Amino acid sequence: MTQPRFASRHARPRRAPLYRALSCALWLGGSLFAAGAFAQDAEPAPQAGAQATAQAGEARTLETVSVLGSRRAQRSSDTTSISPVDVLPMAKNTEEGAQFDLAQSLQYAAPSFNSTRQSGADGADLVDSAALRGLGSDQTLVLVNGKRHHTTALLNLFGARNRGNTGTDLNTIPLMAIDSVEILRDGAAAQYGSDAIAGVMNISLKKRKGCEAVAGYGQYSKGDGENWLASAYCGFGLGSDGTLGITGEWQDRGRSDRSEPAGSPRIIGDSKVKNQTLFLNGDKPLAENVDLYFTLGVQKRDASSAAFARDGIGSEDIPSRNSAAMYPNGFVPFIDGDIDDRFGILGLRWGWGEWNADLSYTYGYSKLRYTINNTLNASLANLDLLNGGKGVSPRSFDAGGFSFEQNTVNFDVNRFYDHIFRGLNLAFGLERRDERYKIFAGEPGSYLDYDGASDGGNAGSQGFPGFRPSDAGGHSRDSWAAYADIEADFSERFTAGVAVRYEDYSDFGNTTTGKLAAGFRATDTLMFRASASTGFRAPSLQQKYFSSTITDFVNGQPVDVVIAPNGGDLANLAGLPALTKEKSRNYTLGLTWSPTADTSLTLDAYRIDIDDRIVLSGRFGDDDPVIGDALRALQVGQAQFFVNSVDTRTEGLDFTFNNERELGNDFKLGTFFALNLNRTKVRAIHAPPALVGREDVLLSERERLFIEQGAPKSKAVLGFDLSRGAWEGNIKAIYFGPQTLGTFSGTANGVPNARYKAKASADLSVTYAFSENTKLTVGGSNILNVKPTRQDPNETDNGHIFDSVQFGLNGAAYFVRLWHRF
């Protein structure tokens, strides 16, 4: 008997029982689906609430949106969900917010969310990574309209956050296009698949009729970092019964500079960014109970980051990294990135009897191409000098880049049974995903060594050596998944749900995850909830295959470092095994309480255990007994690898409080307080047999602290929104807890770690409504001009007096925003 293709890739006989179980589950669901579909003579049972069927002769509404974390066909609030969910409407951020992009807007609204804009971190300066609960950016799954969004092609190698991680570029989605953001603060791999370890974010896009536009301007109190924004949305009818929402956005953010001392050739601050974005979102009924829906997003981003400066005449950088004829006073290379991002969804949603079905195709593409400007190839300049020339080379190089493509097909089915218990929701489905990752080589001058002299010029473009032909290549994989999800109201007070998911990857095998969640309503206003789940994260293709030689500055001195791909010659020589999945166990216990109609609070404790976590290793030097000779042959000083090497435990607490009340004299006051406490600890280090005894190199103290304290241990937001008539004032205080990061020299050499004290900043804004359709807002963020604790610049990752931690390094900023609805 011929086996299906997906069953023949790996000889694993033990899969048969699982296949039988999945087959039975899908057969049962399919039978129920068919029974409901073809029992046309049977009267449908009446359903209550959001589950009620349409009156006779009316088409049933198919767009039944479920709250994140539940596949029930009806929406429930964040205080009645059995999983902790924050629902954040984006209208106020769009109309009045101090921040012009999604990542920074959420940074100052959701304490469990962290996105710190990096500086001096190469490509990480161009794409703001984001994460939940102190974990990595690739341990948070992002959905758009309920469909998996692609990650970026970029792999973060530098910076204080998300080292060795990929993630989703939230800033490819304009605020104006977003209706709300839901944040599920719970493990959900059994429901949504890989990456959903720390939680899941769902970004719901607008498609309502009407038009609105916003124009904004901001800058830092230092007078730099000018930020211009122009964004517009228009929703139309599509025929007589469809809708189409179109959003266009242009954003131009200028460079900021906080380098010290004054006159320093170094530039440290915000990268320069120009975004041009277009989003479409809509649906169109094709027949009774059959809807076509679609989403399209395209962004073109031109971004520029400043690399470490090279010194001029009289320094060791001549001729090794500079040319006296070209830059006698030194220079700052610019890492300029051209970023293309595309995202699309095309789906068909239909109902048949009491069943709902959804078939969709989702496409995602991210491409980053580097051009290094204001630079030189020092070896080429030195060769020109040795041949009697002036000692010059080109000042600009195409350094290559990379791309990531993701294609996903989903088929989802659900039905609500009101006559089983007090209501039971059954959902099941299939998913197929294909991924492709490519590295493009740069032009020869971006990486070649021309003079070959040991005391001559260094190879490649200064600031960012180009990708070599040996780095370039294309890699792909595919996966498929099947899931089943049941949620039932066993009584008026008790709700429970169970989910199981099976996934098979072509490159590392299969995994099965499960989740159990329950909620008990002790009173009409008080509910207790708990969940337990297993999860996983597949190693990204970027982590498996990224290959490059980069230049880092250690104690102010340049060092060439090779990032060797997993499975390559150098990794095999070092004895590193092939990457496999991370495994997790998540537990949450919490409560929700709504003592009055205008007051609610939630409290949730959690623990996340991750085994075989993938990390970027410490650095193996050219004196290493195993790979030292190979590094010297490559003319590099150090090497790093990706490896499943650590077990971690993250424990924490989330608290939210909301209150809205009317005061005297027509005043209205809204109060919001939210707090996240988290602590991550490395519990064990698993060294491959070839590296036993060198665990301190595999995971150095510095790299360990990036894992444990890359995000603040605590974060809190307290906001007050006071309004009366046409006037509205908003004040927000944001508290960032302490962080401790490692130094290059390390505590073993008597150099203390970099300790960042707890800090608090404040935002203030005032809005005047000329009419219900026009608002003007002026205000400031971090108005107290608070900055992180000063450090020794020779010991920080970016060579500045502090890394980009907590709220960043730019200080106070001011803005004005005009919103109008047409």
Image (cartoon, rainbow, N blue to C red):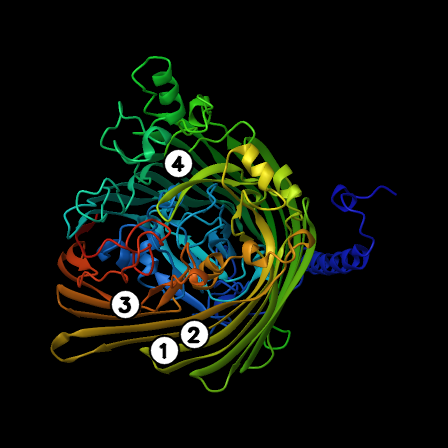
Task: Name the front one of labels 4 and 3.
Answer: 3
Instruction: Indicate which disc residue 79 carries.
Output: 2
Q: Position of residue 807 (x, y in %)?
A: 30, 59
- Count the marks: 4
Task: Name the front one of labels 3 and 1.
Answer: 3
Res. 239 image quadrant: top left
Q: Is residue 549 visible?
A: yes
- Most extreme residue toward the top is 388
Q: Is residue 399 left or right of residue 733?
A: right
Q: Is residue 189 left or right of residue 181?
A: right
Mark toward the start of the polypeptide (2 vs 4): 2
Disc 3 marks a residue whose amino acid type is Lys
Q: Are marks 2 and 3 in contact (CB under 8 Å)?
A: no
Q: CA distance from mark 3 to mark 1?
A: 28 Å
Q: Are marks 2 and 1 in contact (CB under 8 Å)?
A: yes
- Count neighbours of disc 2 (C-alpha within 10 A) and say few if under 14, some if 14 to 19, many if 20 or more: many
What residue is rendered at 32% in x and 20% in y?
392
Q: Is residue 611 left or right of residue 108?
A: right
Res. 649 image quadrant: bottom right
Q: Position of residue 617 (x, y in %)?
A: 54, 51
Disc 2 marks a residue whose amino acid type is Thr
- Count neighbours of disc 1 (C-alpha within 10 A) and say few if under 14, some if 14 to 19, many if 20 or more: many
Q: Secondary structure at mark 1?
A: strand
Instruction: Indicate which disc residue 759 carries.
Output: 3
Q: Secondary structure at mark 3?
A: strand
Residue identifier under label 4: 339
Mark toward the start of the polypeptide (2 vs 1): 2
- Count neighbours of disc 4 (C-alpha within 10 A) and say few if under 14, some if 14 to 19, many if 20 or more: many
Q: Position of residue 819 (x, y in %)?
A: 20, 51
Q: CA distance from mark 4 to mark 1?
A: 42 Å
